[in-house]
């Protein structure tokens, strides 16, 4: 009787599909992503920067689903556009951090010896420095080059500043958070590589005369993809929280653009007068964070090679 073979990814999906909280979280994330990145293009979604002082702090209605803020701007559209910014910062900054951390940790773990010691001491020094202060300083350093880049993009494309600036002004956040946030993933990848490089298939690749680069990136790193995916899923909420803190301090997204962090700050300032300004962005933000954490826990269990097969 022929036994049907099963791959790691099929087993992982089978375990994940039985994890109800993880599946619900995945569905919630898909809905939030569609709402934030597709919703603003729908005709009934209003311009989030249009001011109407005659209709300030209005209650939810058929015209303004979430009501309006203190300047009469539609809160529903501001939550959707703010979600674009928060999610982009979380995803892009995490991608930058993961790329740097994976390469750095893989090289350190595979080469070992004195090189590994020096590289890890540098990581220890970076860990000892105040993370938030470093991000703020780094963001201030790259702020002026970002403004120059915005002007260059406008000159090249001919697009308006309102169309270009919401994305290009995020570049300091992408670079700052990504350039400082790779330390943890570097340690994780280093530990995984150090354990895998002693296995038989790596020794076989060495005996075949393959280069170190080929062995590392073609044979070792694919076996570390599980922990990398898990860390990425769990790192996005932390970076989104960091963006919210920076926006709360006035160092994140610049007005009139908004993010969930800015909306929560504005809502907190006026929560005694119009609590809905705090409620709706907080619900979106908290739902996204909970969904990412539950999905990360589900992926950790699904990709755990020690999990028993059914």
Image (cartoon, rainbow, N blue to C red):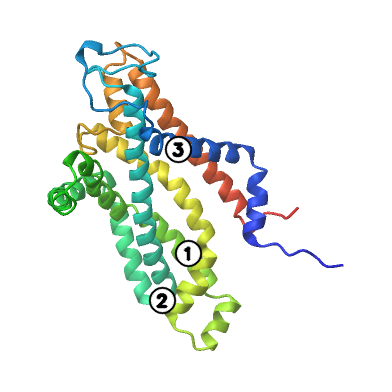
* Quarter of the figure with residue 63: top left
Q: Residue at x 36, y 24 (%)?
A: 76
Q: Which of 281/154 is in front?
A: 154
* Nearer the camera: disc 2 or disc 3: 3
Report which residue position mark 3 lands on. 34
At mark 3, the secondary structure is helix
Residue designated by label 2: 111
Q: With 33 as the anchor, is 294 left or right in this view?
A: right
Q: Height in image: 40 above or below 209?
A: above
- Residue 72 lies left or right of residue 19; in this view the side is left
Image vertical order of residue 209 relative to residue 65, above or below: below
* Image vertical order of residue 276 relative to residue 133, above or below: above
Residue 23 position, x and y percent, is 59, 40
How far apart in space, not on screen, are marks 2 and 1 (Cα)? 12 Å
Residue assigned mark 1: 191
* Sequence-first disc among 2 and 1: 2
């Amino acid at each position: 009787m022929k036994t049907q073979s099963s791959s790691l990814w099929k087993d992982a999906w089978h375990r994940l599909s039985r994890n109800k909280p993880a599946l619900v979280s995945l569905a919630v994330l898909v809905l939030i992503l569609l709402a934030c990145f597709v919703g603003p293009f729908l005709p009934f979604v209003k311009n989030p920067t249009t001011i109407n002082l005659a209709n300030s702090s209005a209650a939810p209605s058929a015209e303004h689903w979430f009501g309006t803020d203190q300047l009469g701007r539609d809160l529903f559209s501001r939550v959707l556009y703010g979600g674009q910014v928060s999610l982009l910062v979380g995803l892009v900054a995490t991608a930058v951090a993961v790329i740097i951390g994976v390469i750095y940790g893989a090289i350190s773990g595979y080469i070992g010896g004195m090189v590994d010691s020096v590289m890890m001491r540098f990581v220890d020094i970076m860990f000892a420095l105040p993370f938030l202060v470093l991000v703020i300083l780094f963001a201030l350093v790259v702020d002026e080059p970002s403004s120059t880049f915005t002007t260059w993009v406008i000159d090249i494309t001919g697009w308006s500043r309102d169309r270009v600036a919401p994305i290009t002004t995020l570049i300091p956040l992408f670079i700052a958070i990504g350039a400082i946030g790779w330390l943890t993933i570097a340690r994780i990848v280093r530990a995984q590589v150090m354990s895998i490089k002693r296995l038989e298939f790596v020794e076989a690749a060495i005996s075949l005369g393959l280069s170190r680069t080929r062995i590392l990136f073609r044979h070792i790193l694919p076996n570390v993809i599980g922990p990398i995916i898990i860390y990425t899923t769990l790192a996005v909420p932390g970076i989104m929280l960091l963006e919210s803190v920076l926006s709360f301090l006035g160092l994140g997204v610049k007005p009139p653009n908004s993010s969930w962090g800015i909306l929560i700050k504005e809502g907190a300032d006026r929560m005694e007068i119009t609590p809905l300004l705090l409620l709706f962005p907080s619900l979106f933000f908290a739902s996204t964070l909970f969904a990412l954490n539950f999905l990360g826990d589900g992926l950790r269990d699904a990709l755990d090679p020690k999990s028993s097969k059914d």
